[in-house]
Amino acid sequence: MTGPGLPAVAKGVGAAAALIAVITLLARLAGFGRNLVFARTVGTTCVGDTYVAANTVPNIIFEIVAGGALASLVVPMLSGAISSGDHERAKRTASSLLTWTILILLPVSGLLALLARPLAQALLSSSSCSGAVELGTRMLLIFAPQVVLYGVGIVLTGILQAHGRFTGPALAPLLSSVIVAVAYLFYRLSAGVPESVDELSTESELLLSVGTSVGVVVLAGVLLIPLRRTGLRLRPSLRFPVGVAPRVRRLAIAGIATLAAQQVAVVVAIRLANDGAPPGTQVLYLLAMTVFLLPWGALAVPLAISAFPRLSASYENSDEASYRATLAPTTAAVLIGCLVGSAAMIAVAEPVARIFVQGTGVPDAGLTTTRLAETIVAFAPGLAAYGLVALLTRALYARGLWKEPTWAVVGGWLLTVAADIGLAAVLPDTSRGVALAAGHSIGVIVAGIALIFVTVHCAGRESLNGLARVGLAAFVAAAAATVAGRLLAQVWDGGDAFQAVAQVLVIGAVVVLVSGATMMVLARSATAAVLRGLRRPDPVQEEVQSTS
């Protein structure tokens, strides 16, 4: 029996992914709305650039110290014990993971607070905004506790996902985004649109910084509710069960290296966005990244998350047939969905940019809209590869592999850094957002391709059976849909932000219809096989459901 008030655990990767996708889409839309509110309240101003830079630091620090490690090891460490019914082992492992996370991240939060001034100086000293370093320092002092909260949240998320309970982790970002958006609105009511950092009052500053931190508290805190319904009673503990610690160390190294490389790329992007580029470039890059993460979060992440416990349990139980039968259709579905998402991003880039910019009172609104649209388009080519990174790294971690995926992904992020620096030097300062987005695309494309080869080498060609045929058909379908969507966007151009919303919906629908029709012509049977694979029942989740 499931716990009271909870739906039965979804059966099959497709069913679980559909549930996650619906909630994640709502959460991503809430995040999109949060950034839309940000654009219309804080805006592409000196305060906006400083806030974005400061608010990114706790996330960077967390990801480097623990984020990658925790994301890579919680589910694999728990899925095998849960699927075999060894709940005592699962409880001891989860308790140790949470205890070590808090012990490591508390001093890190303290160190971040102590180093707030030097970090703000490093990120914002080249900014053309007077007072940016001082404001960034004060914000970092308030943002520092976020590091611990992120850690607690990711451990609780992994515990819930390993139990096949995906609703709580998917809802948490939605609630957090609502809280932060409300903080932005109160900030605007208090501050208006200050022309400079020096005009910002203490009250308005605290509404912005404290309100954001409250959102992170909600992000972690709401997960305690579904955790109670798993029946897992966590207790402080530093000792892992026998045999768990060595695997934890290996996967932790992989996760730390991967996420550290990614955060190096983030730091370089922040620095370049504030180094000689026009004011507001950092905000435009953030908004374009938000658009990029919307289809990624709605299409790739739900499939990767729902497949991860099943892949881990299949490998733990030495069931290679189940592992491959799960990975092949899931990879194909990620590729199809993200290629269509890329087409949609390119087609709707201009009206989406108008939604963010028009009516905000920003100077040179037309030029700002164009810069944002171009940045969105530059992100689009990397969407499918980034989706593969989300899935295939998890698939390899499920096998206990860490060196191979680490080299592939770290190499991609280091290439992103090199591409960002090179493109920023070549392109004009007004195109800095395009340079950074294009560098991101180059790096993740290389990482995604490398992971395909690594997966075939480590798990066998059957693990990605049919991917080439489906991928080629999806690429052609996405290209046709891009052309159709862009033509419609050119014919139906202009209008205010409300008209732009209608344009996004209609053009997006055209992209989906053209893509679907083309796939039915080119690869009907292969697409049907992918859907059948996603509907295959999941014995791991059935075990969780039967013991809940």
Image: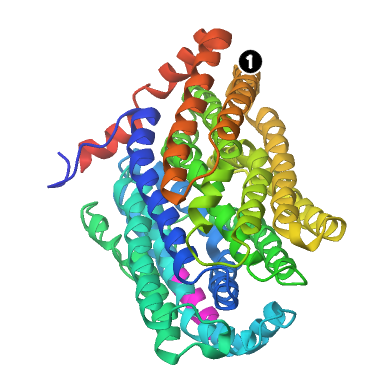
Quarter of the rendering occupied by the C terminus: top left
Q: Nearer the viewer, residue 244 or 111?
A: 111
- Magenta stretch, residue numbers: 101-111
Q: Name the residue located 31 percent from the left edge and 67 percent from the top edge.
A: 221
Q: Nearer the viewer, residue 443 or 313?
A: 443
Quarter of the rendering occupied by the N terminus: top left
Q: Give the number of marks.
A: 1
Q: Name the residue located 79 percent from the left edge and 51 percent from the top edge.
A: 415
Quarter of image, res 131:
bottom right
Give yes or no for residue 247 being in the magenta stretch. no
Question: Label 1 is placed on what type of residue?
Answer: Arg
Q: Residue 105 at x, y = what percent?
A: 50, 75
Q: Residue 344 at x, y = what percent?
A: 55, 35
Q: Residue 298 at x, y = what percent?
A: 44, 41
Q: Residues within 10 Å of mark 1 (few under 14, many from 20)?
A: some
Residue underneath mark 1: 469
Q: Name the residue located 63 percent from the left edge and 26 percent from the top edge.
A: 483
